[in-house]
Image (tube, rainbow, N blue to C red):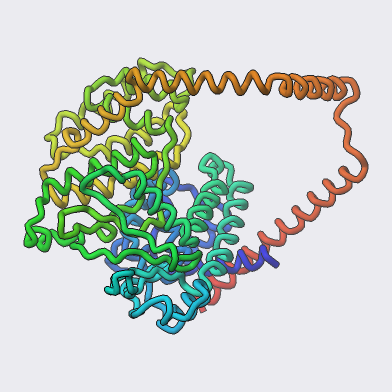
């Protein structure tokens, strides 16, 4: 029954996308079997018009609901899956939906915080913004000195967890079918892609995680200037409710207002770019949704970020990779950039370092000869990640998220300052981080960590030897007697395979009949 329900949900989504006339597959995608038949049958029925694919796709996904909006936004960061053109079309998908009622919001807040709304807030106003997962209300609280303070209260949509669970089940079902029946798609790891989306959504729907992200970033930037985050009100926050300091500021998208208030736009552009790189390199933790709607400038000229539902993390290996890549291109040391790829294990040793350096030069030189204000680090990193497929570099989702965020940050920075020189702005941050990691102090610290690791290994050595001895005995027995399964295990394996085959056949027939029914109903 679960397979039938998933097929029904996917069929509805497919019909909606087909009717919209939107292109949802890369141009080079080869479609065969029932999907090809479905495409040919529904082609005459699709909406016609001069509307761009971007608008059609956005409208169709919005009509399908919150989970499809999130799916579209997620795929916009994965051009390795959907292709560059579709990723570009999806990148403008707006996460905006009509708000739910004030009464529902009040009930949810009271239930989650276990107190009447009048005890929690002096005022609790109507929603000021609504997205697919939550909406924001402006409220007031009384502080110890007796004055009132404005707060932003983020409230999850009622029933959103159940809605996402059903749709994610159907995404997993589709991913399993794709991996099983379409071998060329297996290299894209559809199940792993859906699993990444599911984990991201789970974090985003637990507002305690967003509060924790804000708190962690606040600790990271405690000594920084020019950038800050809102203060969390932990007393009035829970899984489905998040209360923060209300930010009074000018949106970074309102250039004329920023000018009117006397803000230095060139300085803001440089600060934004350096802040992003500092978070990515120094902290390995960055805001991954830094569009203009999430960035404000307060009265003191400080940049304030909001909406921490989507965050990115980089391990030390990825951070060093990023820094060395950027610095290598800045200095045109392509051999060093190539060696970094091999040292990190991203490119297999079967390839030639010299040949890879030659390929990097082909990417870097055309960009470096352009005017400084036209050079895009994000574009450079994007070309690099795409080209490395030729050298068997596997997809690195964390680097793709970084590159996509960099695209957005660069766009905002250049809106503030069209002449912004990304290399001049980024060089001191990258150089400082590399010196901190490769200097004498860093090497002493790394040596101490290495010594500690050796000590732990020596301490565990007797245990490891005992495990190795038992493993060797087991392999010896298998070599002499063969691998044996008891009768019960054999019977259960056979039953599981029989059940799986039966439900797979049923699912395929149900899907085919559903698609045929939709096509016939549209014709008549």
| Above or below, comparing residue 266 to residue 466 in the picture | below
Q: Is residue 471 visible?
A: yes
Q: How far across and down, in percent of the image, does residue 157 sit? A: 46, 72
Q: Is residue 60 visible?
A: no
| Above or below, comparing residue 487 to residue 343 in the picture | below
- The N terminus lies in which quarter of the figure? bottom right
Task: Indicate the quadrant where residue 246 lies.
Answer: bottom left
Q: How far across and down, in percent of the image, does residue 52 sit? A: 29, 62
Q: Residue furthest right?
A: 487
Q: Residue at x 51, y 42 (%)?
A: 188
Q: Residue at x 56, y 22 (%)?
A: 453
Q: Residue at x 33, y 74 (%)?
A: 142
Q: How many marks?
A: 0
Q: Is residue 274 left or right of residue 356?
A: left
Query: Which sits in the foreground, 504 or 105?
Result: 105
Q: Is residue 15 left or right of residue 335?
A: right
């Amino acid at each position: 029954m679960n397979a039938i329900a998933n097929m029904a949900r996917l069929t509805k989504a497919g019909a909606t996308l087909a009717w919209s006339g939107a292109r949802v597959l890369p141009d080079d995608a080869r479609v065969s079997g029932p999907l090809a038949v479905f495409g040919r049958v529904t082609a005459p029925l699709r909406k016609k018009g001069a509307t761009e694919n971007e608008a059609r796709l956005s409208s169709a996904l919005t009509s399908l609901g919150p989970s499809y909006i999130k799916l579209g936004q997620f795929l916009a960061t994965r051009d390795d899956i959907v292709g560059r053109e579709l990723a570009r079309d999806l990148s403008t998908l707006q996460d905006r939906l009509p708000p739910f009622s004030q009464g529902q919001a009040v009930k949810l807040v009271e239930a989650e915080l276990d107190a009447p709304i009048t005890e929690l807030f002096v005022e609790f106003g109507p929603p000021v913004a609504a997205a697919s997962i939550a909406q924001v209300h402006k409220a007031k609280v009384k502080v110890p000195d007796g004055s009132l303070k404005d707060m932003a209260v983020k409230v999850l949509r009622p029933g959103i967890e159940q809605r996402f669970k059903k749709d994610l089940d159907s995404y997993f079902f589709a991913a399993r079918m794709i991996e099983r029946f379409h071998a060329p798609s297996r290299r894209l790891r559809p199940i792993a892609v859906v699993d990444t989306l599911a984990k991201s959504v789970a974090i985003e729907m637990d507002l305690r995680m967003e509060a924790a992200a804000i708190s962690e970033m606040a600790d990271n930037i405690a000594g920084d200037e020019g950038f800050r985050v809102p203060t969390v009100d932990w007393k009035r926050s829970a899984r489905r409710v998040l209360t923060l300091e209300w930010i009074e500021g000018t949106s970074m998208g309102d250039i004329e207002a920023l000018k009117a208030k006397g803000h230095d736009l060139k300085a803001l552009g440089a600060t934004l770019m350096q802040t992003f790189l500092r978070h990515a390199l120094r902290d390995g933790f960055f805001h991954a949704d830094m569009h203009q709607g999430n960035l404000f400038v307060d009265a003191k000229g400080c940049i304030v970020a909001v909406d921490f539902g989507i965050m990115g993390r980089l391990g030390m290996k990825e951070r060093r990779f990023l820094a060395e890549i950027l610095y290598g291109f800045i200095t045109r040391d392509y051999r060093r950039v190539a060696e970094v790829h091999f040292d990190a294990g991203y490119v297999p040793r079967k390839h030639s370092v010299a040949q890879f350096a030659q390929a990097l030069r082909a990417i870097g030189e055309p960009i470096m000869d352009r005017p400084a204000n036209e050079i895009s680090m994000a574009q450079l990193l994007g070309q690099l990640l795409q080209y490395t497929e030729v050298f068997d570099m596997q997809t690195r989702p964390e680097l793709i998220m970084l590159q996509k965020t960099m695209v957005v940050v660069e766009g905002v920075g250049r809106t503030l300052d069209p002449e912004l020189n990304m290399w001049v702005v980024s060089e001191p941050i990258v150089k400082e981080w590399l010196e901190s990691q490769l200097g004498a102090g860093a090497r002493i610290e790394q040596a101490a960590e290495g010594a500690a690791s050796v000590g732990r290994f020596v301490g565990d050595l007797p245990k490891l030897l005992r495990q190795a001895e038992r493993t060797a005995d087991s392999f010896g027995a298998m070599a002499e007697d063969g691998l044996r399964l008891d009768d019960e295990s054999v019977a259960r394996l056979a039953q599981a395979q029989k059940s799986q085959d039966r439900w797979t056949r049923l699912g395929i027939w149900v899907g085919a009949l559903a698609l045929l029914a939709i096509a016939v109903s549209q014709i008549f």
